[in-house]
């Protein structure tokens, strides 16, 4: 497949970029057709947060940012603090099922 152009740009105004497709995007789409994508064809996005005292606030910010997956990052996923964080996030951020990542 030979493509003469390097990228394609879409603008909503003279200063607001709406979209950009590059040759690399097309190549990756062909190379990884089974990539995890949402209903709009966008790649899924994940985030990890720590189990520190502000974990619930961070989880709520991730909900606002529309990430698809959330993990609690901990060296010891079985600790009571991490287990409580998972339970509390699942209770307060109903969109997700959160799990510990060790």
Image: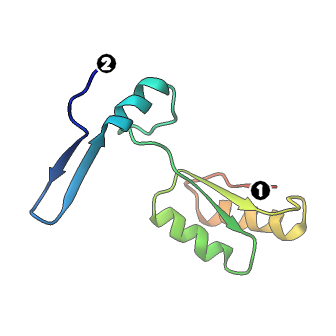
Position above or below: 40 against 102: above
Q: Is residue 4 above or below residue 64?
A: above
Q: Secondary structure at mark 2?
A: loop
State whether residue 6 is above or below residue 59: above
Above or below for 26 versus 79: above
Question: Where is mark 2, residue-wise?
Answer: 1
Q: Which residue is mark 1?
A: 100
Q: Is 15 left, or right, of 35 in this rendering?
A: left
Dots 1 and 2: beta carbons under 8 Å?
A: no
SS for dot 1: strand
In the visual, does 6 lie left or right of 60?
left
Q: Position of residue 55 (x, y in %)?
A: 67, 73
Q: Residue at x 40, y 42 (%)?
A: 42
Of circles 1 and 2, the one toward us is 2
Q: Nearer the viewer, residue 24 or 81?
A: 24
For residue 41, the mark is none
Q: Quadrant of the C terminus?
A: bottom right
**Which residue does the image show at 68% across and 55% down from the upper left?**
98
């Amino acid at each position: 497949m030979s493509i003469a152009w390097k990228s394609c740009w879409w603008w909503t105004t003279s200063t607001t970029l709406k979209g950009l497709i590059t040759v690399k995007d097309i190549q990756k789409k062909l190379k990884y057709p089974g990539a995890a994508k949402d209903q709009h064809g966008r790649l899924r996005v994940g985030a990890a947060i720590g189990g520190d005292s502000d974990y619930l606030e961070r989880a709520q910010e991730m909900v606002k940012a529309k990430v698809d997956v959330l993990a609690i990052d901990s060296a010891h996923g079985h600790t009571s603090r991490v287990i409580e964080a998972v339970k509390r996030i699942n209770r307060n951020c109903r969109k997700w099922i959160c799990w510990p990542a060790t």
